[in-house]
Amino acid sequence: DIKLKKCTACYLVRYCSVKCQKEHRPKHKRQCKRRAAEIRDELLFKQPESSGLGDCPICCLPLSLDPQDSSVMACCSKLVCNGCEHANMLREKKEFLKRTCPFCRHPVPYSDAEIKNNLMRRIEVNDAFAMSQMGKHYYNNEGDYKSAVKYWTKAAELGDMEAHYNLSVMYRKGVVVEKDEKKELHHLEEAAIGGDVDARQNLAKVEWENGRWERALKHWIIAVNLGHNTALKSLRDIYTKTKGLLSKEDFAAALRAHQAAVDATKSPQREAAELAREELEKIKLQREREVVAGNLSL
């Protein structure tokens, strides 16, 4: 029996050989492109159950979209919420223990060199998240954009959404790589499919500027449903300033979904961590004021 192979772009037809596929290509090309675009849109506009950040691996609650509300554990490539990290810190303080990762109990690194070594151990086993974080380290801490792009490219190949988003920024600005709108859009779409809400917001802006308002609204609604505040502001502006594009019912549904997404990230432990952070900021600010006043020496 001959095993027929599907067209990998549209999945509509099957071929007995490469020769058969090539001969049929001129007749099939237009239909194939149309169906491939439809499949891509089905994937792109599917509402994710949660953002690409996922859940905290300890308390299993959705992670907040605010990067200040969680910390990267370079030792195990986990993103841990401040609530769990704060609770772990209090436990260690009470029991006079050394600081460790709240997830894997690896000793907490105290220098950039230690963080880098931890990331490299994860990279050696093809950890996409660690590669993405290493790219951020080179970009933010060392100003080595070439190495950043190298790590982000590898991480993106392994499916890391944040790496895709960062590459989209590089292709838009033309940093290290040449400016390329097609590659920028490709990486934005891949990041959005992976649940990156910032990529979704950027895609909405691109579609809006190009006059594809319905597609832009779809992107904004998906981002709002995941709790993205900037997307909510954009959606509110459209509802109040542009009549007819967004119905009252759709806007109300988006507001409810946004609130539900935000509420899902709350917990008593996270609220306690936020209060502790605010108190620390107050103490720091007071100390700075006293130093300026000359009451304390640096």
Image (cartoon, rainbow, N blue to C red):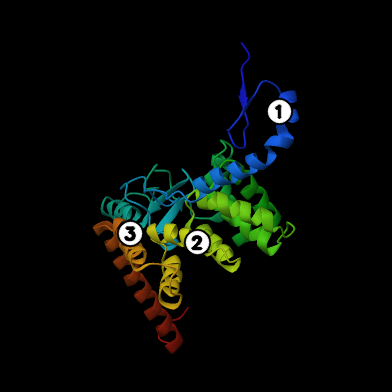
**x, y percent for residue 216:** 51, 62
Kindly identify the residue that appears in the image at 58 percent across and 64 percent down: 206
Residue nearest the viewer, comparing 102 with 213: 213
Kindly identify the residue that appears in the image at 63 percent across and 31 percent down: 7
Q: Could you tell whether 176 is left or right of 84 in the image?
A: right
Residue 87 image-quadrant placement: bottom left
User: In the rendered structure, which amino acid carries the disc numbered 2?
Assistant: Glu
Q: Evaluate if marks 1 and 2 touch, with contact meaning CB atoms under 8 Å apart.
A: no
Q: Earlier in the sequence, mark 1 or mark 3?
A: 1
Residue that label 3 marks:
257
User: In the rendered structure, which amino acid carries the disc numbered 3?
Assistant: Ala
Mark 1 and mark 3: Cα distance apart in space: 46 Å
Kindly identify the residue that appears in the image at 27 percent across and 50 percent down: 95
Residue 160, compared with residue 245, is above or below; it is: above
Q: Tell me, for residue 88, which label it has, or none.
A: none
Mark 3 and mark 2: Cα distance apart in space: 19 Å
User: In the rendered structure, which amino acid carries the disc numbered 1?
Assistant: Gln
Q: Which quarter of the rendering shows the N terminus?
A: top right
Q: Residue furthest top?
A: 1
Kindly identify the residue that appears in the image at 75 percent across and 29 percent down: 23
Residue that label 2 marks:
214
